Amino acid sequence: MSAYTLDEAWSTSRPRNHWYNDNADFALRTLGAGAGRCLVIGSPLFEASELADAGWAVTYLDYRSPPALDSRLAFVQHDACALPFAEASFDTASSSCVLCHVGMGRYGDPVADGSDARMLAEIARVLRVGGLAAITFGPIGAEDAVIEITHRLYTLAGARKLLPPELEEVEHEVLTGGERGYLSMLL
């Protein structure tokens, strides 16, 4: 595991005045109330629980194993770049600020170039036709870049270039919070 994330706390409940809340609110607002299957990849645990509150049958996937998990969530420990699910397995997907770290070793995952594009392709593969994905790419910057070795910055144009043909942008939003804004897209 990277020295940048030793003992990083899990967010099992909404923190006070934190940008994680904006990301979760984006997912909840854009995905809405559900009656189908939702894949949540590495988002704060409270986001997955709130999607379950909204009626979704949530599968929570993370490379690490959470210390505690809402009993309504099915947990799968796996790499987001090689999802262990059949094609068209989910009605929706959500992932808050994972894309900016995936494949960089920050959470003990394998280091591999192009992992953000692979993760998006995997999300497209496991979504049913017409399914929606609420994805917070991560911090938005003046140019696409890597900072602190284990963090990517995205521009809107750079994020759009990563999208596989199966995922089309429905809307995007720059969420405020933290040191910079965070780019979220509904795909």
Image (cartoon, rainbow, N blue to C red):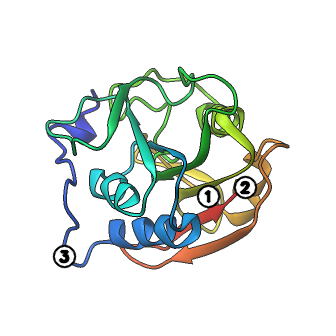
At 40% from the left and 25% from the top, the residue drawn is 109
Give how far apart the Cα atoms at labels 2 and 1 are: 6 Å
Q: Quadrant of residue 76?
A: top left
Query: In screen coordinates, is 113 left or right of 61?
Result: right
Q: Nearer the viewer, mark 3 or mark 2?
A: 3
Sequence-wise, the earlier of marks 1 and 3 is 3
> Helix, strand, or loop for circle 1?
loop
| Residue 154: numbered disc | 1
Q: Position of residue 2 (x, y in %)?
A: 29, 31
Q: Do we see residue 140 in this rendering?
A: no
127 or 99, nearer to the observer? 127
Q: Nearer the viewer, mark 1 or mark 3?
A: 3
Density class for disc 1 (Cα within 10 Å; few <14, some 14-19, many ≥20) is many
Q: Position of residue 8 (x, y in %)?
A: 19, 44
Quadrant assignment for the N terminus = top left
Density class for disc 2 (Cα within 10 Å; few <14, some 14-19, many ≥20) is some
Query: In screen coordinates, is 37 left or right of 128?
Result: left
| Residue 16: numbered disc | 3
The answer to whether the residue labelled 2 contacts the one labelled 1, judged by CB atoms less than 8 Å apart, is: yes
Density class for disc 3 (Cα within 10 Å; few <14, some 14-19, many ≥20) is few
- Circle 2 is placed at which residue position? 158
141 or 62, nearer to the observer? 62
At 43% from the left and 40% from the top, the residue drawn is 149
User: Which amino acid, by three-letter code, is at mark 1?
Assistant: Tyr
> Helix, strand, or loop for circle 3?
loop
Query: In screen coordinates, is 164 left or right of 37?
Result: right
User: Which amino acid, by three-letter code, is at mark 2?
Assistant: Gly
Q: Do we see residue 136 in this rendering?
A: yes
Give how far apart the Cα atoms at labels 3 and 2 are: 31 Å
